[in-house]
Amino acid sequence: MSTARERAREALTADIVDAARGQLAEVGAAALSLRAVARELGLASSAVYRYVPSRDDLLTRLLVAAYESLGAAAEEADDAALAPRDRWVAVCRGVRAWGLEHPHEWALLYGSPVPGYAAPQDTVAAAGRSAAVFGGVLGDAARSGRLAERPPAPGRVDVVGEDVRPVLGGEHPALDDDVRARAVLAWSSALGLVSFELFGQLVGVVTDPEAFFTEQVGRLADVVGLGA
């Protein structure tokens, strides 16, 4: 069991991250400042640095927390009882709903890179959590015989990395590199649709963003072969 000191440290660290999350909405990730966070919490800057040693460390904590929250939303939206196509659409809609509810955190994850910051390896597992939900849909469809065959893309090359295969449904004869490449295309396109909406690129383009999104991610499911 944790000690009282450890629990107090965890609580204050959580307060610092929460305050930084508010800073994201006010000034954006590039202008995030530990000194501003300290002022908001009524603490000396030196006190905050004992818990979060640098701005980059704070950004990493925010990234991991946002990726975990997004992953949890994708997992909650998943329903293994649905047909693969409907299941894919449901997960996409869950991801979109999270993005609309957390626009500043979405921008941190998928917006412009923060100058001078490079995400460390610590963020990789959290970043893959939501992608693993999509991979689960793909893998389950393959193992249940519900993944439709698609003619190979002309002139394709094997480009999907070995480390990504466990996330994209695992190993199965139906899950060749072409299917995985289509899955990456579909997943990244779904995220792009959310970004387009959040960053105002669909204003004046579509009249019903939710209906448009649902229809398009259904088409993306068909590209992967989940429409069978």
Image (cartoon, rainbow, N blue to C red):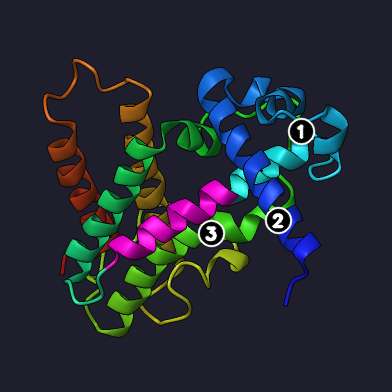
Read off the magenta span.
Answer: 65-78
Disc 2 packing (10 Å; few <14; some 14–19; many ≥20): few
Q: Which residue is mark 2?
A: 10
- Quick check: marks 3 and 1 in contact, CB under 8 Å? no
Q: Is residue 100 above or below residue 218?
A: above
Dot in front, 2 or 3: 2
25 is within the stretch colored magenta? no
Q: Earlier in the sequence, mark 2 or mark 3?
A: 2
Marker disc for residue 165: none
Q: Which residue is mark 3?
A: 128
Q: Which residue is mark 1?
A: 55
Q: Assign a secondary structure to mark 2.
A: helix
Q: Nearer the viewer, residue 50 or 120?
A: 50
Q: Can residue 156 be seen here? A: no
Q: Residue at x 50, y 37 (%)?
A: 105
Q: Assign a secondary structure to mark 3.
A: helix
**Distance of mark 3 from mark 1, alpha carbons?**
23 Å
Kind of residue at disc 3: Gly
User: In the rendering, at what x and y percent does residue 5 appear?
Assistant: 80, 61
- Quick check: marks 2 and 3 in contact, CB under 8 Å? no
Q: Earlier in the sequence, mark 3 or mark 1?
A: 1
Kind of residue at disc 1: Arg
User: In the rendering, at what x and y percent does residue 63 appear?
Assistant: 60, 44
Q: Residue at x 47, y 80 (%)?
A: 171
**Distance of mark 2 from mark 3, alpha carbons?**
25 Å
Position of residue 221 in the picture relative to residue 162 (left or right): left
